[in-house]
Image (cartoon, helix red, strand yellow):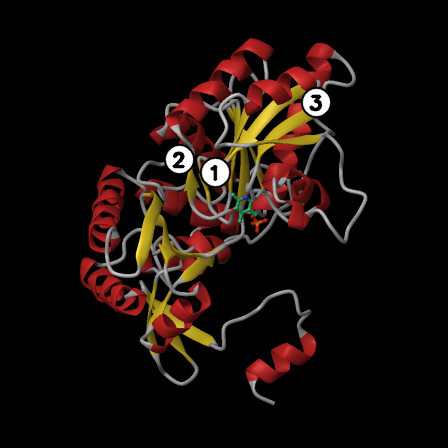
Amino acid sequence: MNIKELDKKYVMGTYGRFPVTIVSGKGSLLYDDEGKEYIDMGSGIAVNIFGAADDEWAKAVTAQLMQIQHTSNLYYTEPCAKLAQMICERSGMKKVFFCNSGAEANEGAIKAARRWSREKYGDGRYTIITLKNSFHGRTITTLAACGQDKLHTDFMPFTEGFVYADPTEIGSVKKLADEHNCCAIMLEVVQGEGGVNTLSPEFIDEIKAVAKEKDLLILVDEVQTGNGRTGQLYGFMNVGIQPDIFTTAKGLGGGLPIGAVVFSEKTENALVPGTHGSTFGGNPVCAAGACNVMERIDEELLSGVRERSEYIINELKGAKGVKSVTGMGLMLGIDPEKPVADIVAACREKGVLVLTAKTKVRLLPPLNIPMEQLKKAVAVIKEVLA
Ligand SMILES: *Cc1c(COP(=O)(O)O)cnc(C)c1O
């Protein structure tokens, strides 16, 4: 049996995989089992920030691997402590809880928001406002947090305590905050899975005003937008929000599984010993990879992200077959006139791997993709879109 047949036979069928078996990569180039080369415009869904098998990152990871791969959270380790320091110092936050994925990070943020509110206001004040079209993960609670009805079937009962505001309607946050006993509002600065949608400045102002008036915590889900993706270290830095709690994962480890819940001065005591934990959380190998990632997301890299973003937008905005280009930095959505599945397949045939978000083509290339490769990929995408 070949790999595709083996996978189909034995791996649970939860993914609609593309008909490609990736065997290796270097930077923004990937290779399949037939030796075909692809330009990677997806980074494993915003994960491989420095592309495949980056030398410096791999060196940091393997050095830690050969030292000690895991200790449990009963002991102190250097990569975990240093990573937490870097995240806090660069975000203006105070404390970090480490875990393994985006969904787990959001679970932690939700637990912390509820506990914070219970300590301050007592029982019953637990509802969290999230946004229509949002995506926060695949666990029962984070699915409940997603503002997408189609995700709220099959697995009843879901965790209660989530209500959904319409980001296209000013006043909807205020209305929900008046009607429910809320503790927090949770949002993505750019909705990734929901279709690469940005929020209007007016809507962001409303969130800030209502949060202030009702003492709601602002939870920002930076799982996809974090780690330089939007052209700033974190997406909220583009829109003038300072979160009370934010979460991140995807790009943080540069390809290793690590997530983080990050707490401000206001929420730094929301979790205390015994209230939360994670066996692998802050694992030294993943944290060493993440330290390397954080050290290298500097102003030079970020301005490179913004330049590449401008290049893509200039090429594709108003191009033939393109209805609109949305997003920020290297997290861009293209609304195509043709069916998105056809575009993805045609790009793949021509050696360019792109993603989708709802009916859009989604681009999430490595943050350091060489301009030459980016130009080639954009030319292919443009030709296919037309
Ligand atoms: C991917 C994603 C998640 C879920 O992350 P996992 O690591 O798959 O659990 C949560 N929120 C956002 C915004 C995401 O893009």
**Residue 323 at x, y = what percent?**
33, 53
Q: Nearer the viewer, residue 370 or 205?
A: 205
Counting the numbered discs, the total is: 3
Q: Can residue 272 be seen in this view?
A: no
Residue annotated with mark 1: 222
Mark 2 or 3, closer to the camera: 2
Tell whether label 2 touches label 1 (CB within 8 Å): yes
Q: Is mark 1 within 8 Å of ligand 1?
A: yes
Q: Residue at x 42, y 71 (%)?
A: 342
Q: Is mark 3 within 8 Å of ligand 1?
A: no
Amino acid tagged 1? Glu
Query: Compared with residue 348, is residue 273 higher up or lower down, i.e. above or below?
Result: above
Query: In screen coordinates, is 154 left or right of 300?
Result: right
Tell whether label 3 touches label 1 (CB within 8 Å): no
Query: Residue 73, labelled with which disc?
Result: none
Q: Residue at x 35, y 41 (%)?
A: 230
Task: Identify the element where label 2 is drawn.
Answer: helix
Query: Compared with residue 167, is residue 94 higher up or lower down, i.e. above or below?
Result: above
For the residue carrying disc 2, how many other residues have a C-alpha within 10 Å: few (<14), some (14-19), or many (20+)? many
Task: Identify the element where label 1 is drawn.
Answer: loop
Q: Which of 244 and 72 is in front in this view?
A: 244
Residue annotated with mark 3: 115
**Residue 233 at x, y = what percent?**
36, 36
**Badge 1 or badge 3: first in the primary sequence:** 3
**Residue 264 at x, y = what percent?**
51, 21
**Quadrant of the rendering where the C terminus is positioned:** bottom left
**Quadrant of the rendering where the N terminus is positioned:** bottom right
Q: Which of 199 and 233 is in front in this view?
A: 199
Query: In screen coordinates, is 134 left or right of 159?
Result: left
Q: Distance between the residues labelled 1 and 3?
A: 21 Å
